[in-house]
Image (tube, helix red, strand yellow):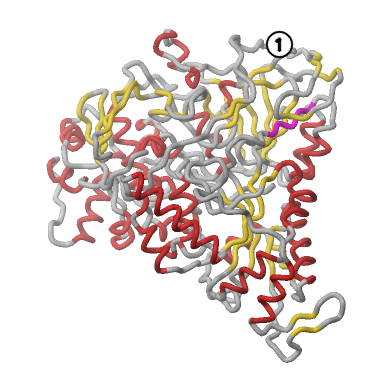
Amino acid sequence: MRPSRRAVTRVQAGIVIVVLIIAAVAAIYFLSVSGPSSTSSTSSTASTSTTSTTSTGSTSTTSTTPGPKNSSQLVEMNNEPTSSIDPAAGFFAGEDEIMTNVYQTLLMFNYTSTTSFAPILADNWTWNAGYTVYTFNLRTNAWFMNGHPFNSSVVWFNIYRTILMQQIGAFYFTSTLYNGTTAYLTGYAVPDGVADALRAGGFSISSTNATLAAQQSANDLATVLSNFKASNSTIQTIMAYPNQAIVVTGNYQVVFNLLNPYRFFQQVMAVPGAGMVDPTFVDENGGVQPNSQNTYVNTHTMGTAPYYVKNYVASEFITMQENPNYWAAKLPASQSNIMLTPPHIPTIIVQYVTQSSSIVQGIESNQAQVTEGPPIPALAPSFLQSLSQHPGIKVESLPNAPTFNFLMITLDTQKYPYNITDFRVALADAINYSEIFSSVALQYGKAYVGPISPGLSYYNPDNLSPYSYNPNTSIKLLKALGFTLTLPNGTTINPGGTKFSPTLSYITSDTAEISVAQLVQSYLLKIGLTVTLNGLTTQGETTDLSQSATASTYPEMLIWYWYPSWLDPVYQDLVVLVNSVYCGISGNLACFTNSTVDALTANLPFETDEAKYNSTVSSVYQMVYQQVPDIWLYAVVPNWAQRDYVAGIFYNPGILGTYYPLVYYTSS
C-alpha cells in the first residue's frame, strides 16, 4: 500500500485552519497481539534459531528459521519517508511513528485499556464540568536527554511554539487554543489571550487594529520563545497571565483554557503534535519564527523519550538509538507504567523504500524484522498471501479489531453528471463488492458503511447495509436519466440520448488500487459505460486535488484511502468528509454540498449533549448514505508482517506505527 491520506493534508493546512473544529468522542483503540518481555534484550550479535508457529490473528509456517542477525538492532521496512520529525511540523503516519518514539507527550493511550490514558510527562490531570478548563499536574522527576529539566514552562513553550509556527501541527489546537479564522484573516496564528499576556509583560500591542495586533503579538512571542529563559521575570509574568490559552500556575502545573468545550481534549494531547522538545535545543538551532518551519529540528531531536534520532538521511533511513539518559528508566515501579518502559532493543533502523518488492525482499531475507504498521499497512493484501507462507515470517491480522484505514471511490459532485444523485447511486449499484473482497482485499478487508470506520465510536448507528451489487438497477437509473448505454450483448439503450464516458483516477504505485480500477472499469462496462483509467503518481494526485473541484483536471472519480488524524471519528471522519467547508483536498474530496448536512455538522464537534450528538450523527449518516457522494469499498483490517522472533508489537489506532520500547526478541 502507499501512504494513506488523513483528515488534513500539509498542502491545505493554511486554508483549512480557518474552519477547523474539534469534536468530542470516546477512544476505542486497543487490541494486543503479544505482550512485552519482562527482561531486556542481550547485546550479543550471534544469530540463534527459532521455531515459528501459527498464532491468534496471524498466519505463518512451522519450520526452523534463523533468529535476528543482530539482537541489539531491529530494521523496519517503510514506504513513507519523512519530511519532518518536528512535532510542530510532522504529520503523516511515517512521521508520527518516529515522533512517537523520540518525543513524549503529557499523556498517551494506555496499552491495556480502551477507556483510560497512561500518564507520561503529566502525573495527573482534571477538567471542569464544562470541558473548557484542563489542569495538568506534571512529573517533578523528568528531564531531557541532555539533562535539561522538564517543567511547566516547557509545556507553555512547546504548544505556543507549535501554534505560532502555523505548520500542520498547529491544526490540532485550532478552535481550542487559538482562533483559526482570525489566523487566516490576519496571517498569524497566536494563542488565545497572548496579546494581553504580552502587554502584561511590557510589550506594546495594538488595541485598535486586529491585523497589526496579530502581527505584533506573533513577532513578540517569537522573540520570547527564541530567547527563552524560564527564570526571566518578564517571561514569568507573561506565562502566569491568567486569561490566556495556557497558564503556568506553578513549576509543575499548567492550566489549559479552551475556546470551546471539548470533552476529549485528552485525545489531542496524546498526538505526536503535542510532543515536548527541549526549548534550549530549539533556540540554539534556529529558534522560533512565525509561519515558518525550523529546518534543523525537522531532522534532529532532543526529547525526553526512550529513543532519539542518531542518524537521518532523507528518503533513505532513520536510525533511532536508545536514550542513554532516559529519566523513566530510573523511576520506581510505583511511579511507572507500561508506556514508560525503557527499550529492549537499543537500535531501531527505519529503512525507506519505494517498491513493495523491496519490502518483501527485506523481510524474507531476514535483513529486516518488521514492516511498517500498524495501523497503516505497508503492503497490499496480494503480497501478504505469499509472505504468510514464507518460513520464519508471521503476517499478523486482526479481523475483530476496530479498523482505522479505509478505501473508497470519491465522486466529484460539482461536475456533471456526478452532481445527479441517481447517477451516483447507479455507480454504487454497479460495483461487485464481493469480487473486490475476494480478489483484492482478500481477508484483509471488510465491508463498511462510511464515513466512519468500523469499530470506532459512532460507526453506522442505524446499522445501514453496505452498498450491494445490483447492475440491473444501475441500468434502469441511467436509462431514466437519458444516458446512451451500449451493453456487452450489443444492445443499445437510449441510442439518441446523452453519451458519457467516466474517467477513473488511481495511484499507479499501489497494486490494490490498480486492481480495483481495472475491476471497476469492467463493472461499468457491463452497464454500458466505457471508463477511461487515469493512472497518477502521488505527487500528481496531490497537484490535481489542490485545484478547485470544478477544474477539468480535478479527478471526477478517484480511488482514495482515508484515516482520521486522531481518534475523533465524528470530526475526523464524518464532519471532514461531508461538510462543504472542507471541499477538496481538506477531506471532502467529493465536494458534497448539502445545506442540511452542513447545518447539522457545523457545530457538532462542540456538542456536549450526548443524546443530541448521537441523533445528529444518525441523521447525517442517513442522508449521506442515500446521496452517495462516495462509494465505500472496504475497510482495511489491521495487519503487518514480522519475523517470528519479534514480539511486543501491538495495535492501537491512537498510536500510528510501532511503539518500539515494548518490542523485543524471543527465542521461543
Q: Quarter of the image holding residue 244? A: top left
Vertical relation: 559 (above or below) 524: above
Q: Residue at x 73, y 84 (%)?
A: 484
The spot of residue 191 in percent (x, y) is 27, 46
Disc tally is 1
Q: Residue at x 54, y 30 (%)?
A: 30
Vertical relation: 428 (above or below) 618: below
Name the side, left or right, on which 577 lies relative to 178. right
Foreground: 596 or 71?
596
The residue that label 1 is drawn on is: 44
Foreground: 191 or 26?
26
Q: Residue at x 51, y 64 (%)?
A: 584
- Characterize the local packing of mark 1: few (<14), some (14-19) or many (20 or more) Cα atoms within 10 angstroms: few
Q: Secondary structure at mark 1?
A: loop
Which segment is the magenta one?
A: 393-397
The spot of residue 162 in percent (x, y) is 37, 43
